[in-house]
C-alpha cells in the first residue's frame, strides 16, 4: 500500500462518517513518512488500514460493513479498513503528542511515529512485526535507543508482555550490532 491508496480509503471513510481526522496505527503508520523517504517494502506490505476516527473513536466500527474485510471496497481495491480503538495497541506515554499529521483536501491522517509503532510491535512480537521493525532500523526511521527509552514509560498489558517485548528489543540490539 502507499499513501495515495490509504487516502482513498480514508476519503471513503470520511464520506460515510462525516469525520475528517483519522488515526492510523499498526504497520501502515509508516506511510506518514512516505513523502520523506522510500518506505521499505517490508514496512508497507499490509493490506489493512488499522485506524479510528480521532474525535469519535467508536464511530469507525460503523464503517466495517462498507470498508472492512470482505466488503465490496476490499474486493475492488485489495485494501480494507480494520476498525480499531485507541487503546488496542500497547504504546508509550506521550505517543499522541508525537503523531505525524498528513493533510490532503481537508482530510487529515494522524500516523504513529515509527519508534512508538515499534514499541507496540515489540509488545505483540509476531515475526511480521520483527520484520517491520528491522526494516525500519535499516531505513533509519526506527531507533533502538529511543524504543528502549520509551519502553520505560509504557504500560504493558501484563508482566509477560513486558518481558517478551524487552527480550525482543535486546535480541534486536545484538542483531543491530552485528550489522555494523
Image (cartoon, rainbow, N blue to C red):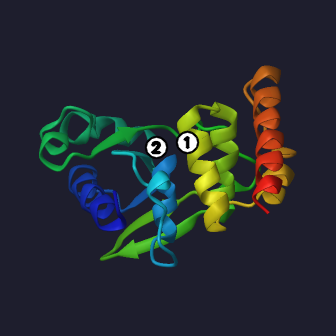
Quarter of the view holding residue 139:
bottom right
> Which residue was labeled with disc 1?
86
Quarter of the view holding residue 82:
top left
Residue 112 horizontal side relative to residue 51, left or right? right
| Distance between the alpha carbons at the discs numbered 2 and 1 | 7 Å
Q: What element carries label 2?
A: helix
Q: Quadrant of the C terminus?
A: bottom right
Assess disc 1: are there few (<14), some (14-19) or many (≥20) residues with their C-alpha within 10 Å of its C-alpha: some
Residue 10 horizontal side relative to residue 29, left or right? left
Which is more toward the observer, 54 or 100? 100
**Image vertical order of residue 131 relative to residue 6, above or below:** above
Q: Position of residue 150 (x, y in %)?
A: 81, 51
Residue 57, label in figure: 2
- C-beta proximity under 8 Å, tags 2 and 1: yes
Q: Where is residue 71 in the image (x, y as percent from the top left)?
A: 17, 35
Residue at left offset 43%, top offset 63%: 109
Residue at left offset 49%, top offset 61%: 40
Q: Which of marks 2 and 1 is nearer the N terminus?
A: 2
Kindly report which numbered mark, 2 or 1, lies closer to the viewer in this rendering: 1
Residue at left offset 75%, top offset 47%: 92
Amino acid at each position: 500500500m502507499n499513501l495515495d491508496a490509504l487516502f482513498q480509503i480514508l476519503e471513503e471513510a470520511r464520506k460515510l462518517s462525516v469525520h475528517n481526522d483519522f488515526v492510523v496505527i499498526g504497520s501502515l503508520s509508516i506511510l506518514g513518512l512516505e513523502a520523506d523517504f522510500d518506505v521499505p517494502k517490508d514496512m508497507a506490505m499490509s493490506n489493512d488500514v488499522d485506524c479510528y476516527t480521532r474525535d469519535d473513536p467508536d464511530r469507525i466500527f460503523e464503517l466495517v460493513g462498507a470498508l472492512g474485510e470482505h466488503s465490496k471496497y476490499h474486493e475492488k481495491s485489495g485494501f480494507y479498513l480494520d476498525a480499531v480503538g485507541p487503546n488496542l495497541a500497547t504504546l508509550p506515554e506521550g505517543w499522541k503528542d508525537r503523531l505525524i499529521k498528513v493533510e490532503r483536501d481537508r482530510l487529515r491522517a494522524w500516523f504513529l511515529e515509527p519508534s512508538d509503532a515499534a514499541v507496540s510491535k515489540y509488545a505483540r512480537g509476531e515475526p511480521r512485526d520483527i520484520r517491520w521493525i528491522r526494516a525500519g532500523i535499516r531505513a533509519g526511521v526506527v531507533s533502538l535507543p529511543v524504543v528502549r527509552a520509551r519502553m520505560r514509560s509504557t504500560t504493558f498489558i501484563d508482566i509477560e508482555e513486558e518481558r517478551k517485548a524487552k527480550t525482543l528489543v535486546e535480541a534486536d540490539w545484538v542483531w543491530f550490532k552485528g550489522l555494523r
